[in-house]
Image: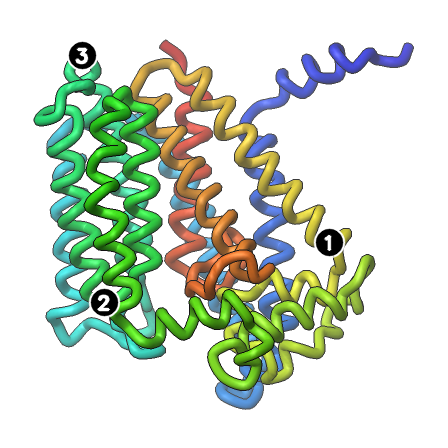
Amino acid sequence: MKQTPGARWRSYQNVSYDFRLILPMLILIGLGLMMIYSATSTIALKRYDNEAYFLIKQSMWAGIGLVCMMIIRKIPYDLNRFWVYSLILGTILLLVAVKFTPFGASAGGATRWIKLGWLKFQPSELARFVMVIFLASSLSRKADQAHTFWIGFMPHVIMLGIFAGLILLQPDFGSAAILCMLTWTIMFLGGVRLSHLLLPLIVLVPGAIRYMVSASYRMDRIKAFLDPWAYASSYGYQPTHSQMAFGTGGLAGTGIGNSFQKLYYLPEPHTDFILSVAGEELGLIGVLFILALYAIIVWNGISIALNAPDRRGALLAGGLIAAIGIQVFINMGVALCLFPTKGLPLPFMSYGGTSLLFSMAAIGMLINIATTRR
């Protein structure tokens, strides 16, 4: 007997969140590994005499991420204040170490990593994860006073200022801006007054714009965004070649491994512009499939937040899925030339161990919340 749409929907709802979140995540990671190998095999062979160098490193991080995800899935998410503030202190120390100790590693004119032997770690990714935990914990404890300025708003903005200020020193304007957007989103979900959220923007937005235009390279990116083809040989090089990649891919793509733009034309094809390589090799159909996988993750994350067993779980799930959704939205927007160029990885797919680790940790936490009962 054929099932009705309502019966099919109820059957889907009965499927565990382990399957509904982990399956699309694993498919995205698998696609990412294929695209990373395709985009880097030539580069890796030339630099490291091993065409699978980047693939092996990313696979190792994926394995570490799976272990962390399974551990986080079992740890109670309602951490007490001691552990929350321990995480905050550890994150601040790591952000300070990036800029003010010999362990800081630089690339592309910015110092954003800590390097310990073969391990390269980006604390700003940890800062985003810890900020969500802190906000969910604080706003759930202050539920009755979230509408007040000095309790519901100011302490969270001070913590944001510490994290964002240290990230801006690297400098990393994009990560700081995303952290601000994420904080405002969680505070809104946590019941902070709309007036408290909107009025400071009168000062913060002009200040952010002034900071953004203070560096010539950021202005160059804005010019390239407004008219990339006019600056195709200079700072419009990345967006124009990204457009070429999507255009070459067409509907069905050129086939896995057949990207032309990855061959020293599109800079950073395995990190910021991994979607461009996917667009060229998998075509519009492949990009829509990737977008659908992210939509499934975001949809289920929202469902977990709406059905969480308590306020902290709801805010934590809402913050984690917002963090993933914002990052996907901005990365895809940059790859499609809808936003100015920003060095931001695509969750689960881009090369980068820290991003992959904390994206998988977020999935583990979401499953933790979903499987917790009152």
Asked whether residue 90 is in view, the answer is no
Assess disc 1: are there few (<14), some (14-19) or many (≥20) residues with their C-alpha within 10 Å of its C-alpha: many
Q: Locate the C terminus by quadrant.
A: top left
Q: Where is 164 relative to 350, above or below? A: above
Q: Nearer the viewer, residue 212 or 129?
A: 212
Q: Position of residue 247 (x, y in %)?
A: 74, 67
Q: Where is 333 relative to 265, above or below? A: above
Assess disc 2: are there few (<14), some (14-19) or many (≥20) residues with their C-alpha within 10 Å of its C-alpha: many
Residue, x 12% and y 41% (percent of image)? Answer: 158
- Whether the residues at callouts 3 and 2 have beta carbons within 8 Å, the answer is no
Residue, x 72% and y 72% (percent of image)? Answer: 257
Work out which residue is located at the far left of the displayed protein and give it: 150
Question: SS for tag 3?
Answer: helix
Q: Nearer the viewer, residue 253 or 353?
A: 253
Hey, what amino acid is under mark 2? Gln
- Whether the residues at callouts 1 and 3 have beta carbons within 8 Å, the answer is no
Question: Which residue matches tag 1?
Answer: 286
Q: CA distance from mark 2 to mark 1?
A: 35 Å
Q: Position of residue 264 (x, y in %)?
A: 59, 84
Hey, what amino acid is under mark 1? Gly
Question: Which residue matches tag 2?
Answer: 170
Q: Position of residue 332 (x, y in %)?
A: 55, 54
Hey, what amino acid is under mark 3? Asp
Q: CA distance from mark 1 to mark 3?
A: 47 Å
Rendering quarter of residue 186: top left
Question: Which residue matches tag 3?
Answer: 144
Residue, x 42% and y 65% (percent of image)? Answer: 343
Q: CA distance from mark 3 to mark 2?
A: 37 Å
Badge 1 or badge 3: first in the primary sequence: 3
Assess disc 3: are there few (<14), some (14-19) or many (≥20) residues with their C-alpha within 10 Å of its C-alpha: few
Q: Nearer the viewer, mark 1 or mark 3?
A: 3
Question: SS for tag 2?
Answer: loop
